[in-house]
Amino acid sequence: MKNELRILYKQIRKDIKIQPELYAQQLKNIIKPESSISIYYPLLNELNILSILPYLNTNKILLPILQKETEPLLFSLFIQNKTELQLNKFKILEPIQKNYEIPQFCIVPLLCFDPQNKHRIGYGGGYYDRTIQYYRSQNYNTKFIGFGHELLKVNNIPYTNNDQQLDFIITNQKIYY
C-alpha cells in the first residue's frame, strides 16, 4: 500500500505550488528567530522549501549530508548562494564543507502524511526515520517538522516500528501538533 501511495502522491505533489509566506508564518509559530533549522534541498517536484529562506534570515540554516545507508543523516551549515554544494549518490545537493551541527529543528520532506498520528511517507529509503530514531535515542532535543500541503493529507497511513512520528506537520493552512 505504501508504494501505491508514493505513486499517487508524487503525481498530486508535482502540481502544487506553495505560497512561501504561509509556510513561513506557520514555522514562526514553532521556531524561534535564532534557532538552527535543517531544511532539505528539493528534488524535482518536491515542495520548494528554498522559497521560504528569505523569511528565515535570522535562523541558522543547515542541509543534510548522506552517510552510509544504515546511518543517520548529518547536518552542515548552508548559506544560500555561498555554500559550495555537490551532488550525492541520489543527485541531491549537499554541502561540500562538513561543518556538522545538531539542528534544533529539522524540516522533513514528504509525499503524503497522516495528520492524526503524524506519520509520513517519503521515498522509502528510511534516512529521516533512522535520523529521528537516532536523535531521540541520544536525547537530542531536535524537533522534526513535516513540510506538507493539505492536498497531501491521508488518513491511516500504514506504518511499521521503523517509521517514526514527526513532532509537527506544517501545511499551507495549519500546523498539526
Image: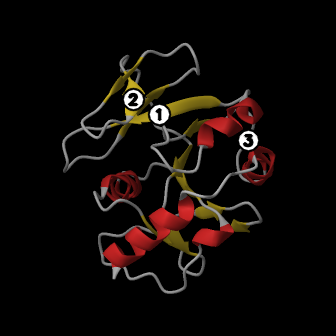
- Residue 85 is situated, as x and y percent measured from the top left of the image, at 41, 21
Left or right: residue 105 compared with residue 54: left
- Residue 116 is situated, as x and y percent measured from the top left of the image, at 59, 81
Quarter of the image where one finds residue 6: bottom left
Front-most of residues 108 and 75: 108
Residue 63, which numbered label?
A: 1
The Cα–Cα distance between marks 2 and 3, rounded to whole angstroms, is 25 Å
Write the residue at 50% across / 52% down: 108
Residue 94, which numbered label?
A: 2
Between tags 1 and 2, which lies in front? 2
Mark 1, Cα crowd under 10 Å, few <14 / some 14-19 / many 20+, is many
The Cα–Cα distance between marks 1 and 3, rounded to whole angstroms, is 18 Å
Residue 142 appears in the figure: no
Residue 122 appears in the figure: yes
Write the residue at 70% across / 51% down: 18
The amino acid pointed to by label 1 is Leu
The amino acid pointed to by label 2 is Glu
Q: Is residue 117 above or below residue 50?
A: below
Q: Secondary structure at mark 1?
A: strand
Front-most of residues 170 and 167: 170
Q: Earlier in the sequence, mark 2 or mark 3?
A: 3
Write the residue at 74% across / 45% down: 20
Quarter of the image where one finds residue 74: top left
Q: Is residue 105 above or below residue 170?
A: above
